[in-house]
């Protein structure tokens, strides 16, 4: 199958997922080309190429460029992943007759301005259940397919005994997350035996090491005991054997077998409807993990298995390819009906 994916440059779990999915679909025998627009510097291009691996990738989202690309590649489906490509994907689909699939990666995208594209899409993928519920069934076009984790890229590693609890915050520090990150930084201030590193687009506090945004966080996760963040960061950490603290706009605390299913329904997003992040609550969770090596080991084993069973990128890619095939079969049926006058 030939697949044209549309996205745009925005360092995030969303962009990481686009390329992880593209790489795995290619491994499964499909021809994938990703157009990832708004790449404006050589540094951004190097980052995109790191994510793309061997998958062909271009950066021009103009109408003429896309039309020429579609004519050359002759894709079977167009898959738009970002708000800046929904309308473009819909336009290209109308112009070429190629079926459009949209992945809606955030509830903030369920807005009137994107409704024309949603209405045209043959399928709308929502990566988690509460997002799909907000999107609505739309005549059976809405489907839940989670964002997947490449388990080879994020291998499990048993942690050696050590005196210091290594904690990695992985994710953006935007306006919504700022209060939580500040609470995390204050939680470790003066806390003996706990070391915090921020892998993010912005620094946190002077007493916390900041390593910037990471194109490949796997080595940092493998060298950490605890991952702190939301969404994809939580899953990548679990895959490598980290315990996970869910911290975003709100605080969901330690991820365990008891709360994992409910938090997965909302993509481990740390919503404000949870609990307001406070240094005391975060410090309590860190001390608990620091003092209980057995808990860390049991959570590590469980976490890896949890990701293997529910978020393996191989399964996610197979589900996505199955959805593409479903859309193409429906298109064939419609063509046969038109030709037969039915």
Image: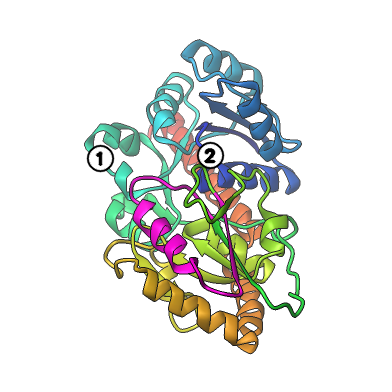
- Callout 2 touching callout 1 (CB < 8 Å): no
Residue situated furthest front in the rendering:
190
Residue 293 picture location, percent across and down? 65, 85
Is residue 230 found left or right of 304 in the rendered image?
left
Mark 2: secondary structure: loop
Residue depicted at x 56% and y 80%: 289
Residue depicted at x 69% and y 44%: 23
Is residue 247 found left or right of 219 in the rendered image?
left
Note whether residue 249 is visible: yes
Q: Label 2 to label 1, Cα distance in Å? A: 23 Å
- The magenta segment: 170-199
Q: Which residue is mark 2?
A: 11
Residue 262 picture location, percent across and down? 39, 74
Crowdedness of circle 2 by 10 Å Cα count: few (<14), some, many (20+)?
some
Residue depicted at x 51% and y 38%: 332
Residue 200 picture location, percent across and down? 53, 47
Magenta stretch contains residue 172: yes
Q: Which residue is mark 1?
A: 111
Q: Quadrant of the C terminus?
A: top left
């Amino acid at each position: 199958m030939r697949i044209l994916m549309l996205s745009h440059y925005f360092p995030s779990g969303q962009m990481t997922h686009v390329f992880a999915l593209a790489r795995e679909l290619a491994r499964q025998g499909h021809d994938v080309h990703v157009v990832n627009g708004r790449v404006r510097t050589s540094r951004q291009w190097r980052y995109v190429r790191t994510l793309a691996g061997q998958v062909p990738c271009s950066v021009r989202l103009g109408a003429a460029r896309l039309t020429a690309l579609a004519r050359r590649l002759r894709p079977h489906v167009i898959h738009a992943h970002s708000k800046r490509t929904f309308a473009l994907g819909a336009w290209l689909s109308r112009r070429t007759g190629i079926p459009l699939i949209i992945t809606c990666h955030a509830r903030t995208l369920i807005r009137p301005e994107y409704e024309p594209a949603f209405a045209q899409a043959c399928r709308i993928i929502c990566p988690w259940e509460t997002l799909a519920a907000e999107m609505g069934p739309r005549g059976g076009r809405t489907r839940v397919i989670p964002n997947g984790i490449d388990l080879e890229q994020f291998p499990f590693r048993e942690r050696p005994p050590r005196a210091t609890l290594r904690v990695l915050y992985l994710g953006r520090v935007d306006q919504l997350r700022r209060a939580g990150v500040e609470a995390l930084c204050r939680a470790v201030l003066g806390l003996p035996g706990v070391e915090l590193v921020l892998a993010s687009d912005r620094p946190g506090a002077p007493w916390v090491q900041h390593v910037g945004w990471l194109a490949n966080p796997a080595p940092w996760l493998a060298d950490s005991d605890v991952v702190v963040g939301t969404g994809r960061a939580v899953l990548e950490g679990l895959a490598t054997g980290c315990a996970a603290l869910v911290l975003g706009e709100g605080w969901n605390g330690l991820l365990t077998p008891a709360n994992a299913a409910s938090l997965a329904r909302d993509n481990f997003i740390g919503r404000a409807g949870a609990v307001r992040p406070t240094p005391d609550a975060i410090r309590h969770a860190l001390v608990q993990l620091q003092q209980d090596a057995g808990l860390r080991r049991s959570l590590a084993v469980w976490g890896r298995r949890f990701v293997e069973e529910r978020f393996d990128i191989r399964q996610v890619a197979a589900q996505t390819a199955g959805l593409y095939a479903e859309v193409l079969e429906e298109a064939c049926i419609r063509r046969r009906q038109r030709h037969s006058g039915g």
